[in-house]
Image (cartoon, coloured by chain):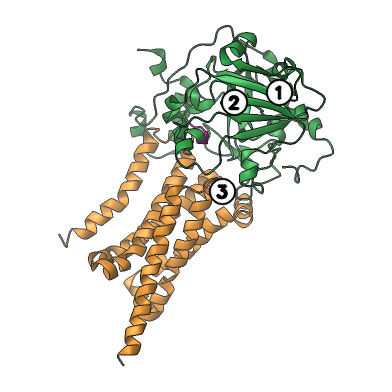
């Protein structure tokens, strides 16, 4: 069971990509397949971001230790899907029209938020290895990786602005991200309180 | 095998084009279309003739399957696939259309009386959605101007307001769609009586599918799609500019005029380009959606201000 956790998680993380490939191959994405691919990739990246954020709260609240063991994999897969999402937008949707992309990013807050999230995830993905953890020192590494909450916030607003009216689904995911952050804030406050009380 | 089960050639060819760009095309071509929703066809409309002035021969028509499965119709749900999936929930008979307000002859029509009194002709129009996708659709209908004339608008009829049906069993009405209902739209009287403005009762020579706004809707081809109100129950002529659903919901994003304009962006995305359904790369959006004949309606107006 313990040994199989990694491979099982890996397979689950690959499943959305396999599903999308199958849908593309069988024209299952409807009238606007490019839009569907971008939407689906973004959605998977967002869910993986939320799952990555859920690992520590799962330990704090439920006492589960196993999610921590796959946290880095979840984070890396989140970045992988975010890259595919961003590349589908730049290469296929915008046809590599760099002028148009630059204007789009700077002028439209929806696109800006998406690109900002991706840029924020980039250093986190690069420094996700043990080597980088050692090089930076654990404290500094940890502080850097708290940026993932900023990424979660930006991604939530990006997701919200995707639709003409706010969707129940999007608001629910936003609440999940806020709840996960709250768990950590409460835990940190408690930890500080106990440290002060017992010198 | 019924003809409706045959994949139209246009769609088939389009699928191949997409696959050529996508990965694993060799395998893909050997697979049947798994994911596509089956589309029901409506009753053939009798005696519809194509109007050669609006044939739009240079444009490739968007396949029936796409026109009827990729829709915005919030009363039937907010996802693009919801309207076709929930189409059966909309009751289109009995149906009345009330014409009221600043008219000499107000009248409450039964829809079948309208269908009999106003024979439809086919016109192929471009449709540009505010979400930056577009289609080319052979509509069946008649000019709104002809319909309004029958009711003798008074000199105070400066605007036309449209109201869409509210039926309690519809998922958007029952649940949460984010916008208030009934859906309201409106036009200036000169826009409403422009020869391009059509009251539509069918598409592809068939009775209008529910998800496309059955039994009667308006189509204004030079404006973003949301102006073309669906499933109309009331047409009111009035002296003041009517309030419209999307401009009330977010005035900075959707204006009363909503003319297709590549130079005026939506705050969240660009309007300079659009994806024609069936194509991969975006194409340039045309001012007034490629209907320059309407430009005179807006002479002297700042289109950035009156978006």
Query: Quick one: quadrant of the C terminus of chain B?
Result: top right
Q: Is residue A181 above or below residue B81?
A: below
Magenta range is: B70-74
User: Residue B222: x and y, percent?
Assistant: 69, 31
- Kindly identify which chain the residue marked by label 3 belongs to: A
Does the magenta portion include B73?
Answer: yes
Gap between marks 1 and 3, in whole Å? 36 Å
- Kindly identify which chain the residue marked by label 1 belongs to: B
Chain in orange on the image = A
Labels 3 and 2 share a subunit:
no
**Of label 2 and label 1, which has the lower sequence position?**
1
Q: Nearer the viewer, mark 2 or mark 1?
A: 2
Chain in green on the image = B
Q: Report crowding for label 3: few under 14, some 14 to 19, many 20 or more residues within 10 A (C-alpha).
A: some
Single out the residue that lies furthest toward the bottom.
Answer: A199
- From the image, tell me which residue sits under label 1: B196
Labels 2 and 1 share a subunit:
yes
User: Residue A8: x and y, percent?
Assistant: 23, 54
Gap between marks 3 and 2, in whole Å? 42 Å
- Principal secondary structure, stretch drawn in magenta: loop
Q: Secondary structure at mark 3?
A: loop
């Amino acid at each position: 069971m313990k040994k199989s956790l990694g491979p099982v998680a890996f397979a689950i993380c690959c499943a959305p990509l396999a599903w999308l490939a199958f849908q593309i191959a069988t024209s299952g994405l409807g009238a606007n397949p490019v839009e569907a691919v971008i939407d689906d990739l973004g959605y998977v990246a967002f869910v993986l971001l939320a799952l990555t954020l859920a690992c520590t709260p799962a330990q704090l609240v439920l006492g589960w230790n196993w999610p921590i063991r796959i946290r880095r994999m979840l984070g890396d897969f989140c970045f992988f899907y975010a890259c595919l999402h961003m590349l589908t937008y730049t290469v296929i949707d915008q046809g590599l029209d760099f002028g148009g992309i630059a204007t789009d990013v700077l002028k439209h807050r929806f696109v800006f938020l998406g690109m900002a999230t991706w840029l924020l995830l980039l250093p986190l993905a690069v420094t996700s290895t043990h080597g980088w953890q050692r090089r930076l020192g654990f404290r500094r590494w940890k502080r850097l990786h708290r940026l993932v909450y900023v990424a979660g916030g930006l991604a939530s607003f990006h997701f919200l602005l995707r639709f003409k009216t706010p969707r129940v689904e999007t608001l629910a995911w936003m609440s999940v991200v806020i709840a996960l952050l709250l768990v950590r804030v409460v835990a940190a406050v408690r930890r500080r309180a106990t440290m002060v009380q017992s010198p | 095998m019924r003809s409706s089960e045959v994949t139209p050639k246009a769609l088939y060819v389009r699928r191949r084009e997409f696959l050529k760009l996508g990965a694993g095309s060799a395998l893909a071509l050997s697979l049947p279309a798994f994911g596509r929703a089956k589309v029901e066809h409506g009753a053939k409309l009798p005696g519809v003739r194509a109007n050669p002035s609006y044939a739009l021969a240079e444009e490739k028509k968007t396949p029936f399957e796409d026109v009827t499965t990729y829709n915005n119709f919030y009363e039937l749900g907010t996802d693009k696939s919801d309207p076709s999936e929930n189409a059966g929930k909309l009751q289109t008979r009995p149906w009345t259309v009330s014409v009221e307000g600043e008219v000499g002859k107000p009248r409450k029509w039964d829809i079948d009386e309208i269908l009999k009194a106003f024979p439809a002709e086919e016109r192929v129009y471009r449709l540009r959605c505010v979400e930056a996708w577009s289609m080319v659709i052979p509509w069946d209908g008649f000019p709104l101007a002809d319909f309004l004339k029958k009711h003798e608008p008074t000199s105070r009829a400066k605007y036309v307001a449209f109201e869409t049906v509210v039926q309690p069993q519809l998922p958007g009405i029952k649940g949460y769609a984010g916008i208030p209902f009934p859906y309201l739209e409106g036009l200036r009287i000169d826009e409403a009586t422009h020869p391009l403005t059509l009251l539509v009762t069918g598409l592809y020579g068939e009775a209008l599918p529910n998800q496309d706004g059955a039994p009667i809707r308006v189509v204004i081809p030079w404006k973003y799609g949301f102006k073309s109100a669906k499933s109309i129950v009331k047409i009111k002529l009035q002296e003041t500019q009517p309030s419209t659903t999307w401009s009330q919901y977010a005035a900075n994003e959707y204006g009363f005029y909503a003319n297709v304009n590549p130079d005026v962006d939506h705050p969240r995305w660009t309007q300079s380009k659009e994806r024609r359904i069936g194509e991969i790369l975006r194409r340039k959006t045309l001012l007034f959606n490629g209907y320059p004949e309407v430009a005179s309606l807006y002479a002297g107006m700042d289109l950035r201000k009156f978006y």
